[in-house]
Image (spheres, rainbow, N blue to C red):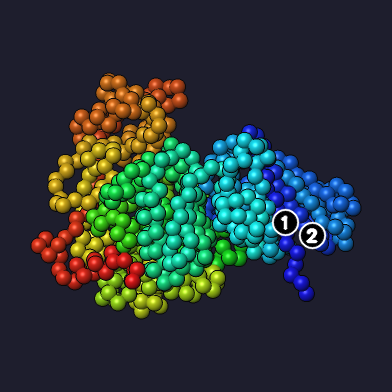
């Protein structure tokens, strides 16, 4: 028997000014009187129902002999074609997709560039998901855009490198796993273990491209060395640069990133290999994160993701492992690859710890619950989210840190989380066999020989805080809590712990982009909530003095702990008065300190720290 004929998709950025992609699908050998087509409701890696089909603006089908086919819409994302001559010729389906959402998970088209994920454009033919696909990517018809190039990790099948033309995919799952960028982008190319890697940068930027490749290559090499295998033959970062934005989405051979211009290294800095500033460090952390996913979640996958499709939510308690462990390693790889030093790494950890501990929601939701409910809670956060939920990214990273340090301590350095990740890779990544809901826990216990039931019960299924202080001590790091010194204080690393007097505090957060003092969050069981203030209230005066967003912190800072202040605020258009009694700001800010032999770290702790932060590259 010959191989089944491929499905042929053709994409044209037909009318950039109207943000419309035209897509054509040729289905050979229809072999049925009717066919069903559907678009996914969500995109892997972003756990929210997005109903991409709402952007399909027209759809029609025909068969040469039979002429136009009857099209019936069955639900929000499914169409049925009827009246097909089953022995007849190719069925052609044509549709248009509106693309005007500039995110890593959707599609965007104008006269500056085109970008799409297959989940936004490619209809699935029910029952033919395993068929290979031929993908013809055509340039925009407008001659003014004749200099556009194309970047995708789809396998070339005739197209020139960075060119329009023909590509191919193994099956539908592969087809929708390669985002496509078209336009005028800058390119950075480098190799990791002999495998070609590239970053295509779209949007106005004047980044130091040499610096980028000099930093990205060792980060990627670090991840590959840690897993012991680089299971790809190409890799592509698609980076969209904007004034302000942040996001990333992982794929098997590529990732899409959205970053702020200021996060890219300024050009002309390459002769001075200074450590990355905070903005650039954040961008490198994002690249590191998405690249780690090529193992963890794209190949090592929850079993429920392997077994279920994309038409409705798929719940798993494992996102703490796929996002939390990835978040732990994204920063760790920066220090292991020599991009930042130990202090820089601790600074990032202190900020993550602070972020988790500032939200009362960590006491209301477990990590496993946060994972399971990602669809309706983490991805649909409202004003009460800080009181009601915990992030499986941030607390998941802390659970990974605690797990790593626990394993290192209890096996006397014989094992680490690295060994657990390598075992997950061997058993689930290489084989494609999905991870059971408690599979990460089981592999960790088996690989290390430790009884980790108590650890996982506490970390994943309880809301009590992780006890990080004694774990940090095992690697010669001193940790303490102190009150925040101001709104921009997110904790960090210090040489010595100084005294910080708690400021008067009422437990609120303001909307970040408003000039008025609009309450975004009213923290649970804190003075503002007790006095009756609510999210959305606009504070206009504190003890009779006019307040706006810029001045409120200073006004509240001059109140006296324990003495009532009168706050005037509008709720809707009604002026209200609240008697608020400021409390001392809570000790919710994490500070870390690297110890050396002189300041109390013993040799074992210093050796453990070296092993923890050491590169895996041999
Ligand atoms: Zn991620």
Q: Are marks 2 and 1 in contact (CB under 8 Å)?
A: yes
Place of residue 88 in the rendered image (x, y in percent of width and height, measured from the top left):
87, 59
Classify the position of the N terminus by image quarter.
bottom right
Place of residue 278 in the rendered image (x, y in percent of width and height, measured from the top left):
31, 46
Q: How many marks?
A: 2
In this orientation, does residue 382 appear?
no
Crowding near the residue tagged with mark 2, few <14, some 14–19, many ≥20 C-alpha atoms within 10 Å: some
- Residue 461: quarter of image: bottom left
Residue in front for this viewpoint, 577 or 537:
537
Residue in front for this viewpoint, 21 or 33:
21
Residue in front for this viewpoint, 585 or 516:
516
Crowding near the residue tagged with mark 1, few <14, some 14–19, many ≥20 C-alpha atoms within 10 Å: some
* Residue with the most extreme right position: 65
Separation of residues labelled 2 and 1 (CA atoms) = 9 Å
Q: Determine whether 280 is above or below 29 in the image.
A: above
Q: Which residue is mark 1?
A: 8
In this orientation, does residue 18 appear?
yes
Classify the position of the C terminus by image quarter.
bottom left
**Label 2 or label 1, whichever comes before in sequence order:** 1
Q: Which residue is mark 2?
A: 28
Place of residue 186 in the rendered image (x, y in percent of width and height, measured from the top left):
48, 46
* Residue with the most extreme left position: 598
Residue at the (36%, 43%) spot, across then down: 267
Q: Determine whether 131 is above or below 559 in the image.
A: below
Residue at the (46%, 55%) spot, across then down: 189
Q: Determine whether 73 is above or below 475 in the image.
A: above
Is label 1 in a helix, a strand or a loop? strand
The image's mark for residue 393 is none
Mark 1 close to ligand 1, CB under 8 Å: no
Q: Is residue 57 left or right of residue 414?
A: right
């Amino acid at each position: 028997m010959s191989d089944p004929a491929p499905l042929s998709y053709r994409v044209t950025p037909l009318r950039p000014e109207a943000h419309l992609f035209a897509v054509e699908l040729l289905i050979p050998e229809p072999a049925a009187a009717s066919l069903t087509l559907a678009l996914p409701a969500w995109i892997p890696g972003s756990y929210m129902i997005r109903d991409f089909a709402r952007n399909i603006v027209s759809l029609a089908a025909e068969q040469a002999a039979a002429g136009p086919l009857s099209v019936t819409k069955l639900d929000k994302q499914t169409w049925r074609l009827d009246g097909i001559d089953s022995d007849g010729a190719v069925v052609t389906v044509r549709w248009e997709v509106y693309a005007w959402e500039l995110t890593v998970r959707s599609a965007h088209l104008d006269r500056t560039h085109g970008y799409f994920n297959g989940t936004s454009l490619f209809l699935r033919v029910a029952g033919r998901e395993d068929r290979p696909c031929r993908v013809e990517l055509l340039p925009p018809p407008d001659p003014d855009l004749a200099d556009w190039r194309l970047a995708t990790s789809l396998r070339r099948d005739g197209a020139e490198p960075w060119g329009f033309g023909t590509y191919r995919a193994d099956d539908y799952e592969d087809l929708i796993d390669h985002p496509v960028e078209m336009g005028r982008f800058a390119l950075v190319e480098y190799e990791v273990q002999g495998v070609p890697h590239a970053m295509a940068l779209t949007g106005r930027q004047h980044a130091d491209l040499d610096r980028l490749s000099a930093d990205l290559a060792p980060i990627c090499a670090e991840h590959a060395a840690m897993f012991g295998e680089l299971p790809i033959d190409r890799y592509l970062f698609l980076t969209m640069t904007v004034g302000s934005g942040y996001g990333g989405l992982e794929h098997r051979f590529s990732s899409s990133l959205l970053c702020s211009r200021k996060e890219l290294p300024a050009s002309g800095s390459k002769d001075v290999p200074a450590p990355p500033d905070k903005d650039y460090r954040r961008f490198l952390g994002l690249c590191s994160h998405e690249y780690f996913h090529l193992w963890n979640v794209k190949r090592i996958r929850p079993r429920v993701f392997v077994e279920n499709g994309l038409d409705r939510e798929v719940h798993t308690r494992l996102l703490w492992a796929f996002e939390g462990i990835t978040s732990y390693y994204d920063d760790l790889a920066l220090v292991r690859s020599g991009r930042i030093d130990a202090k820089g790494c601790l600074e990032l950890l202190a900020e993550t710890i602070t972020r988790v501990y500032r939200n009362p929601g960590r006491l209301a939701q477990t990590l496993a619950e946060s994972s399971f409910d990602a669809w309706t809670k983490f991805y649909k956060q409202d004003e009460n989210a800080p009181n009601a939920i915990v992030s499986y990214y941030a607390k998941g990273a802390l659970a990974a840190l605690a797990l790593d340090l626990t394993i290192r301590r209890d096996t006397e350095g014989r094992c680490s989380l690295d060994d657990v990740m390598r075992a997950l890779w061997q058993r689930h990544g290489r084989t494609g066999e999905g991870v059971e809901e408690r599979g990460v826990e089981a592999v960790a216990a088996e690989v290390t020989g430790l009884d980790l039931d108590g650890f996982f019960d506490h970390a994943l299924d309880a809301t009590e805080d992780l006890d990080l202080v004694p774990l940090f001590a095992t690697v010669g790091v001193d940790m303490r809590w102190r009150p925040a010194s101001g709104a921009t204080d997110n904790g960090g690393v210090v040489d010595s712990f100084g005294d910080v007097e708690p400021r008067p505090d009422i437990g609120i957060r303001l909307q970040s982009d408003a000039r008025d003092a609009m309450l975004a969050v009213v923290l649970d069981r804190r003075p503002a909530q007790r006095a009756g203030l609510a999210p959305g209230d606009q504070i206009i005066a504190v003890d009779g003095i006019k307040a706006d967003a810029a001045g409120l912190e200073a006004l509240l800072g001059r109140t006296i702990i324990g003495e009532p202040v009168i706050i005037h605020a509008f709720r809707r258009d009604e002026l209200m008065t609240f008697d608020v009694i400021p409390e001392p700001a809570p000790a919710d800010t994490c500070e870390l300190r690297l110890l050396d032999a002189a300041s109390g770290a013993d040799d074992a702790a210093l050796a453990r720290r070296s092993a923890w932060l050491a590169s895996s590259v041999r």
